Amino acid sequence: MEIREFADGDWPLVWPIVREVVRAADTFTYEPDMTESDARAIWVERPPGLTVVAADGGALGTAKMGPNKAGPGAHVATASFMVAAEARGRGVGTAMCRFALDWARDRGFAGMQFNAVAASNTSAVKVYERLGFEIVGTVPGAFAHPTLGHVGLHVMYCGFSGEGS
């Protein structure tokens, strides 16, 4: 598997993954019926951010990363990951998260923060914890899961070089 920078020609490979994940409405806080145009505007990062594709013949997943906030919060990175249904459980998400962590460290970020990880997304939470993230807070009932009802949204953080941890 190769993780490479997103190119304009990749959108036809990435859009089905984004559409599938967003419409499931069980992990992301995006509007489930978002249009393709809106999805592209949200998912494809501009510098200093980066969008990538995990590929092995076809697209297995996609990730985006960049500063978590602007101004005084720009020293902390954030990232989001989407894996195609047929590629789940094969280490694609883990590989993209490692890539994002390395990308952020190489650019001098103090750490990486995830703002809204659905507590019900236990496989992602386990991956993030295994890679050094901690749950620093949970907003009870902040995510309306389509079958589980209101579940918590975790804020997770991984500090680099002892900063912020």
Image (cartoon, rainbow, N blue to C red):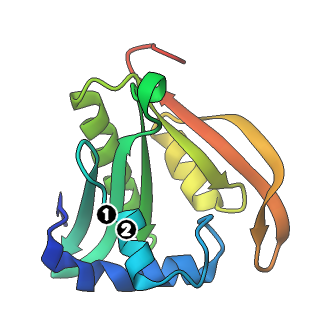
Looking at the image, residue 86 lies above or below residue 122: below
Image quadrant containing the C terminus: top right
Q: Is residue 149 left or right of residue 65?
A: right
Residue 105 placed where, x, y %?
29, 29
* Labelled pair 1, 2 in contact (Cβ < 8 Å): yes
Q: Residue furthest top?
A: 162
Looking at the image, residue 6 lies above or below residue 37: above
Foreground mark, 1 or 2, reads: 2
Residue 147 placed where, x, y %?
80, 79
Q: Residue at x 78, y 53 (%)?
A: 152
Q: Is residue 56 left or right of residue 136?
A: left
Give the residue type at disc 2.
Ala
Q: Secondary structure at mark 1?
A: loop
Looking at the image, residue 51 lies above or below residue 145: above
- Mark number for residue 41? 2
Q: Residue at x 25, y 39 (%)?
A: 103
Question: Which residue was labeled with disc 1?
Answer: 44
Measure the alpha-carbon separation of dots 1 and 2: 6 Å
